[in-house]
Image (cartoon, rainbow, N blue to C red):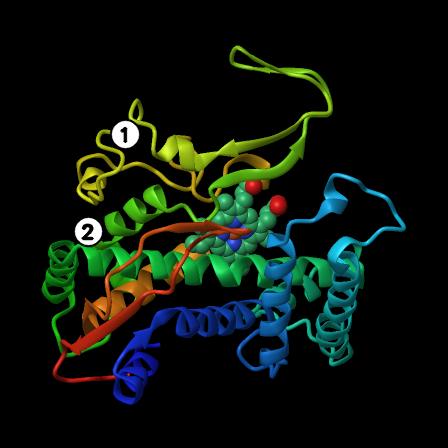
Amino acid sequence: MVAEVREEMKERRVVVLRDILQKGSLSNVLESVFGSDVSVEREELGFMVKEGFDLIAKFNLDDYFPLRFLDFNGVKRRCCKLAGKVNSVVGQIVKERKGAGDSRSGSDSFLSALLSLPEEDQLKESDMVALLWEMIFRGTDTVALLLEWIMARMVVHPEIQAKAQEELDTCIGSHREVQDSDIPNLPYLRAVVKEVLRLHPPGPLLSWARLAIHDVHVDKTFIPAGTTVMVNMWAITHDPSIWRDPWVFNPDRFIEEDVLIMGSDLRLAPFGAGRRVCPGKALGLATVHLWLARLLHEYRWLPAKPVDLSECLRLSLEMKRPLECHVVQRRSKVTQ
Ligand code: HEM
């Protein structure tokens, strides 16, 4: 990641982080899902994730007129094609690993963990494929676009960027790379991540399209059976009755009060809460902390052109226009 930024700066004189982050995030999630020693169709899986996002973001008349024989804009056809590809590409990896008798103890991947379950708990192959694909699909984009928002905020607020870098220099110095074990000693950096999750939650609408199966009261609101309900986390995190100066980017608010973000405090639940909470939240957060720390430790980030903080909602809340930066090397001794 750090080396790719350097290359891009050298070759193009400008760093467009989005592609670098997407590629890095896909590799990272594939490694967690299939393990580091497995060669997978990286490029093909990348296209499949992209196709899935395109399809989800598409306005689809079928959602309003669900007639089996109609296929407005060819969405159904594309969905079927993608489902077929998922079954063949991911299914093939599962088959190969099963065939090779992969039930290693001390497994280093999600798939190995599934395959090493006792006989009576084993999932059907089709369920395994669905589960693994869901992890790949949901885990790639969220991490990449959260980091793009964070870096945009770092560029827009150079004084906050400098404060995070000062913390890194004090804690780590300049002669080694940041490690996972350093993260607990970087409270300001973690506060920066929380503040971006508050202002730009990648999943702003929780519980996409959950259906009330019986009449229910939520506080004073009556929700009749059959209603589709979503939780607008974006509205909660911008609500002035909950947050002081909600539009101000101020990581210090989380130094003053340590708000938990894993789902127990509904003022800020960027990973959801309850039984459908994000299962990748710990992995996602650990990745974002480490990559952010390395990017800030290594470089000073400057705008290549004015940063546009406009939002665009697809499955996740993205920056409408990609961030373009210049970087200046900070550490004199570079270690990889
Ligand atoms: C910083 C990164 C991430 C953010 C902000 C995030 C956020 C979310 C949110 C808001 C939901 C919906 C929760 C709800 O509807 O109540 C969700 C669901 C999900 N996430 Fe994440 N996520 C992140 C990273 C990941 C990663 C790395 C993975 C997998 C490796 C992952 C896998 C999933 C899956 C499979 C679901 C669906 C769970 C279900 O429907 O039961 N996420 N995530």
Name the outermost residue toward the right.
69
Image quarter of residue 131: bottom right
Q: Position of residue 111 (x, y in %)?
A: 64, 67
Measured as percent of width and height from the top left, residue 72 is found at 77, 53
Image: 84 above or below 207: below
Task: Give coordinates of residue 273: x percent, y percent.
Answer: 50, 36
Amino acid type of the residue tagged 1 in the rendering: Trp
Marks 1,2: beta carbons within 8 A = no
Q: Residue at x 53, y 38 (%)?
A: 206
Mark sitting on residue 99: none
Q: Which mark is residue 243?
A: 1
Q: Residue at x 15, y 84 (%)?
A: 333
Q: Nearer the viewer, residue 31 or 137?
A: 137
Q: Is residue 214 visible?
A: yes
Write the residue at 20% across / 56% down.
156
Q: Earlier in the sequence, mark 1 or mark 2?
A: 2
Does 208 sit left or right of 124 as displayed?
left
Question: On the picture, is 89 further left or further right than 247?
Answer: right
**Label 1 secondary element:** loop
Q: Is label 2's Cβ within 8 Å of ligand 1?
A: no
Q: Is residue 123 visible?
A: no
Q: Quadrant of the rendered structure where residue 15 is?
A: bottom left
The circle on residue 188 is 2
Would you say 86 lies left or right of 21 here?
Answer: right
Disc 1 versus disc 2: distance between alpha carbons? 19 Å
